[in-house]
Amino acid sequence: MKRLQKSQDNVMLAGVCAGIADYFGIDPTIVRLIYVLLTLAGGSGVLIYIILAIVMP
């Protein structure tokens, strides 16, 4: 059973993007690019990242 959790191996800030990439089986760079686009498109990326960093085990 797969669990959504922060990555311990591929960490840049808190491991959130790498954890999401591991869960969906994609490259962490793609998730990081999506995060940057969300941040530049209105700032919602920062809020989502903070919430996920707190909520994800």
Image: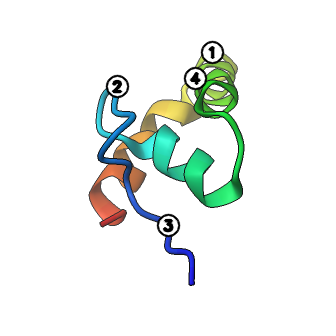
Which three-letter amino acid code belongs to the residue tagged 4?
Thr
Which three-letter amino acid code belongs to the residue tagged 2?
Met
Which residue is disc 4 drawn over? Answer: 39
As drawn, 38 above or below 5: above
Foreground mark, 4 or 2? 2
Which residue is disc 2 drawn over? Answer: 12
Mark closest to the chain's N terminus, 1 or 2: 2
**How far from the left and from the top, in percent, is residue 29?**
62, 24
Q: What element does badge 1 sit on?
A: helix
Which three-letter amino acid code belongs to the residue tagged 1?
Leu
| Residue 15 occupies quadrant | top left
**Contact? badges 1 and 4 (CB < 8 Å):** yes
As drawn, 53 above or below 38: below
Instruction: Tell me if 53 is positioned left or right of 20 in this view.
Output: left
**Residue 4: numbered disc:** 3
Which residue is disc 1 drawn over? Answer: 40
Foreground mark, 4 or 3? 3
CA neighbours of label 1 inside 10 A, class few (<14), some (14 to 19), many (20+): few
- Depth check: give the residue in front, 54 or 28: 28
| Residue 43 occupies quadrant | top right
Q: CA distance from mark 3 to mark 1?
A: 25 Å
What residue appears at the point 57 percent right and 23 percent down from the top-left corner? 39
